[in-house]
Amino acid sequence: MRFVLLVLLASGCGEAMTADAGVDAGRVVIDAGTDGGRGFDAGACAVAPAFGLADLNGKAGFDPGGPTSPPFNFATLSRASGADAGRFDVMFNEFYAGAVVSNAMIPAEKYRDCSLCYAIRIDCDTMGQNCAKSYLAQSGSVTVSAATQDAGAGRYAFQLNNVVYQRWDFTSDTAIDGGCLALGSFSFSSSWP
């Protein structure tokens, strides 16, 4: 699995980070009523958790990749889960495309094949694992305005719009019954070190 493992800390990770939580931080019902025939109704989706400025105790940067993963930019945000104390909701934002993109459609594809990989995991442990539910973006659009490919210093900035996250089994890398999440709009910008 390409998920970046991290320990979620109550304070920052030593990176200079800024973020714009976007319009209502995911509280807007998405425009499209369906997923274009992929089997789920966006209008029936639950609203995605509202990640914002207080959730920057996650991490952002560039990973040069390795034998099983190509290079990618990433931003990970976390927030206390409403389900249990000591549990977290986590938003993973991975960009494998390299060059910046404008209003690119997020395709319905498996996690192992995606270059625009946006996921939300609900009610997770402090490592962002052992989650009650996991979701993978299967439609919507993204604009990536900055994606520095330097682990030492750089910037990652993106805007998500009208995204539908389908319930996902990351072990078998398949969609599963159990609903979806809708995210109206979300903006993020961070710099490192």
Image (cartoon, rainbow, N blue to C red):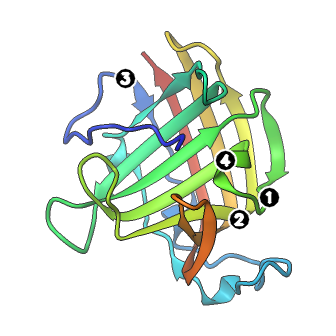
Q: Of circles 4 and 3, which is in front?
A: 4
The secondary structure type at the circle numbered 4 is helix
Specify the farthest residue to the top. 152
Q: Residue at x 49, y 43 (%)?
A: 3
What residue is disc 4 on? 112
Q: Residue at x 19, y 42 (%)?
A: 10
The secondary structure type at the circle numbered 2 is strand
Using the image as rendered, state which of residue 13 and residue 54 is in the foreground: 13
Give the side of residue 59 with respect to residue 87, left or right. right
The CA distance from mark 2 to mark 1 is 6 Å
Label 1 crowding class (10 Å Cα cut-off): few <14, some 14-19, many 20+? Answer: some
Label 4 crowding class (10 Å Cα cut-off): few <14, some 14-19, many 20+? Answer: few
Asked if 128 appears above or below 97 in the picture, the reply is: below
What residue is disc 3 on? 15
Q: Of circles 3 and 1, which is in front?
A: 1
Asked if 125 appears above or below 66 in the picture, the reply is: below
Q: Are marks 4 and 3 in contact (CB under 8 Å)?
A: no
What residue is disc 2 on? 138
Number of callouts: 4
The CA distance from mark 3 to mark 1 is 31 Å
Using the image as rendered, state which of residue 45 and residue 21 is in the foreground: 45
Label 3 crowding class (10 Å Cα cut-off): few <14, some 14-19, many 20+? Answer: some
Where is residue 86? Give x, y as percent.
Answer: 15, 59
Where is residue 172? Give x, y as percent.
Answer: 57, 61
Label 2 crowding class (10 Å Cα cut-off): few <14, some 14-19, many 20+? Answer: many
Q: Earlier in the sequence, mark 4 or mark 1?
A: 1
Q: Are marks 2 and 1 in contact (CB under 8 Å)?
A: yes
Q: Are marks 4 and 1 in contact (CB under 8 Å)?
A: no
